Image (cartoon, rainbow, N blue to C red):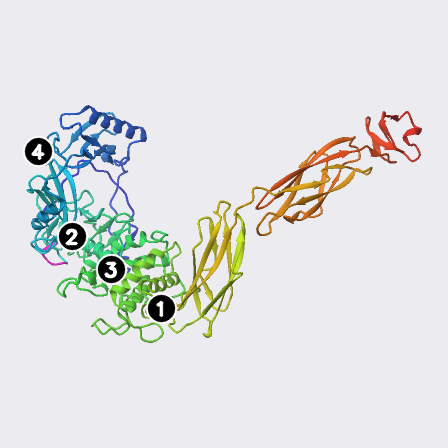
Amino acid sequence: MQRTTRRAIMCALVAAAMASALTSPPSAAARTPAKPATTAPEPPMYAPPDKEAQARALDLATRALTGGQGVIERSSGDRFGAPRTVFGAGGLQFLSFPRTYRGLPVYGGEVNFMISRDGRTLHHTTTAQQAEIDVPVTPEIGERQARTIARAASGPDATVRSARLLVHVTGSAPRLAWEVVAEGRSPAGLPAEPHVFVDAAGGKVLEKQDAIKQAVGHSHYNGAPVTIGTAATETGYALRDPSRPGIECGTASAVFEGPDDEWGDGSGTDHETACVDTLFGVQRQWDMLRDWTGRNGIDGQGHGFPAKVGYNMPNATWSGSEVNMGRNLAGTKQTTPLDVVGHEYGHAVYQFSGSGGSGGPGWGAALDESTGDILGAILEHYVGHPAALDEPDYLVGEEMDLFGTGPIRNMYDPARIDGHPGCFTPTPPTDAHPGAGAQNHWFYLLAEGSNPANGNPPSPVCRGGEVRGIGIRKAAAVFVSALQLKTARWSPGEARRATVEVAYGLFGGSCKEAGAVKDAWESVGVSTQPGELIVECEVRFDLLPPAPPGTALYPGDSEWTLIRSQTDHDPAPQLSLTSSGAPAGVTVRHPPYFEVGRPVAVKIETASWAAPGNYPITFTARAIQDVKSVTYLLTILKRPPSLRMRMEPDTLRLDDELTGTATLITEAPDGPPIVVKLSSAGSGWITTAFDRTEITAGESAKVTVTVPPDVRPATGVVHVYANGPVSGSVDLSVLVPPARWRPWTRYAVDAIVAYAGQEYICVKAHTSRPGRVPPKVPALWRLL
């Protein structure tokens, strides 16, 4: 039956730019609809409460559980776990507490609270439990018998997946029960996941429910009726997928809901029908990504995104968080055929793969647009509709006839649609939609080849000879997996390297798949990239032992080694190089690729906290069907506690010229040589110099000390430091004698000098002159 959506209780205007559209509007006679006037958005209804309000709500709910309320039936054996918190419109807080009874989970015993945004008012409390629990926790019916009963209740060919003991409280009285989860088929042959609750006292089936809800939809593009996953609500059903988080469909105001689970009227203009087609498509795309590419959900993390229909323009868009489906130019069809649904959700796959999001203009936007086309084609082939419906092909949007001219893009020969380029050029495209053609062309060649034998049309090549395809399922696995290598600077060259790597990894080093990826890229104008994996089965090479083959390092040190190779192949191939076995705290730095015959410099770095031990590090070089490895032995030594060092002499008396030399002596610890750097500090009037500022532990260095001539006799100290993988320090005492009297020297009062074995103190500041020695001028000098 046909319905309109229920009015939302609360709504907010949200202005969102449609970031990724299915197509550009036609450049000639198309007119741009007037942009509707908008009003300023109200403050968001979805803003969560602050941390203090959340804490108050948790305290309020906890006190309600402890004190008890009329709807909360609680026994002495009940315990409540940490709540799951969800914030609703206007910041309402919803807290759901799981319950256990004497250690067993309680099915239906959860207690749910609705609390105000500020956390001060408890609005409502709900629970499915109707009576206090007072049941034994030892079953009379064992698990094996319960599995047998549940299997029989689940239909023919059902298999049991799991069973657990719990307390079932949704009936009139709590019962100890087994929950048995099975897998099978419904009477209509659809997938089913029955949960069967078996009374643990007598074996009666207390309840049976299917976790997979199958609705009936009247589709426009996919036949009628079709089955889609929907969710049960308090009053009926909603177009919300219960097993694919985030997948739902409605208009801009609300998700479609209704009293029964039958949707749409099958017409091309009905919005509810558009949602049937959209959900049918995205649910199959989710399954295709799982089955053909190993991807978990649209975003790769087990989540999807909502769709909205009724977009009043001839287009379909992906906004970055939702899909918006419009109509064709004539207004006779919604833009919801399989390939278009796959295209728009393909933008989400692109955005949530690798890094870089949806990318920028130029190649990033063109490759994003192409990703949508490719995933739309893959979806059509996964579903496999007959020719009367949206059958598998490599045309985009032909069923919806967007502008009255048929398909909007052609993947096997892009130039057939408005001259779209089917070959890559060095210049990035300015329009993403025709710019998608070259990668679309590559995918067709990879999947089907240039002259398919399966009835698909031939495809021209930009250069080179015939290309043999590997089949769309393998091509899909290569393409979607390679998107996980996407960066913010995604380009045709980067896509080529990534797909070659993935083909090699997916298909066990087979030349067929990896070679086909290369041939398809070559055929659309993308040449071999620097560092690209060589795909030649006949390549053979030898990997020589590292030079040196190992080293011993203290934590914090580093060392270099060379990886060497040789081959008779001409020209010398490039190989991939990987390393393994490095422990925590050790970094092995080397290029990911190298040319055979050229030594590869590898740096081994150890952190200061790396654990001592012996660590064999394996280096592996790979061609398509030849793999060689060599081992490098890294030994991390236990760092000595400190460097032993001493001064000879340990007390240095300076000469009459106020200078002197001592020797720093160090002792070498066990292990490899350790280089340390020397430095000094100490009394500010002492100047220190080393004959060598860097030595190997076990060597010595000369330390020269000088002081200015006006320094009166004193005792100072020099702190000598050695720093490196190990460190040490030693003090040198310095005795400063009186300076020898010198002519033409400025002396201050109290300056002390030595002359002819005697010491004199200056009593009057002056500049000394030849012949006026201290004994002869008592007005200037006094004998000490």
> Which tag is nearer the camera, tag 3 or tag 1?
3
First in residue order: circle 2 vs circle 3 = 2
Q: Position of residue 428 (x, y in %)?
A: 38, 61
Per the model, the C-alpha gap separating discs 4 and 3 is 47 Å
Question: Does the magenta segment cover residue 224?
Answer: yes
Q: Is residue 118 visible?
A: no
| Residue contact at pointers 3 and 1, CB within 8 angstroms | no
> Which tag is nearer the camera, tag 1 or tag 2?
1
First in residue order: circle 4 vs circle 3 = 4
Per the model, the C-alpha gap separating discs 2 and 4 is 45 Å
Q: What residue sits right under mark 4 in the picture?
A: 173
Residue 292's tag is 3
The amino acid beneath tag 3 is Trp
Q: Position of residue 390 (x, y in %)?
A: 16, 62
| Residue contact at pointers 2 and 3, CB within 8 angstroms | no
Q: What residue sits right under mark 1 in the picture?
A: 518
Q: Is residue 51 above or below residue 690?
A: above
Q: Quadrant of the C terminus?
A: top right
The amino acid beneath tag 1 is Lys
Q: Nearer the viewer, residue 614 or 49?
A: 614
Q: Position of residue 25 (x, y in %)?
A: 27, 57
The boundaries of the magenta stretch are 222-229
First in residue order: circle 4 vs circle 1 = 4
Per the model, the C-alpha gap separating discs 2 and 3 is 26 Å
Q: What residue sits right under mark 2 in the picture?
A: 274
Q: Nearer the viewer, residue 435 or 619?
A: 619
| Residue contact at pointers 4 and 1, CB within 8 angstroms | no
> Which tag is nearer the camera, tag 4 or tag 1?
4
The image quarter containing residue 575 is bottom left
First in residue order: circle 3 vs circle 1 = 3
Q: Nearer the viewer, residue 588 or 547?
A: 547
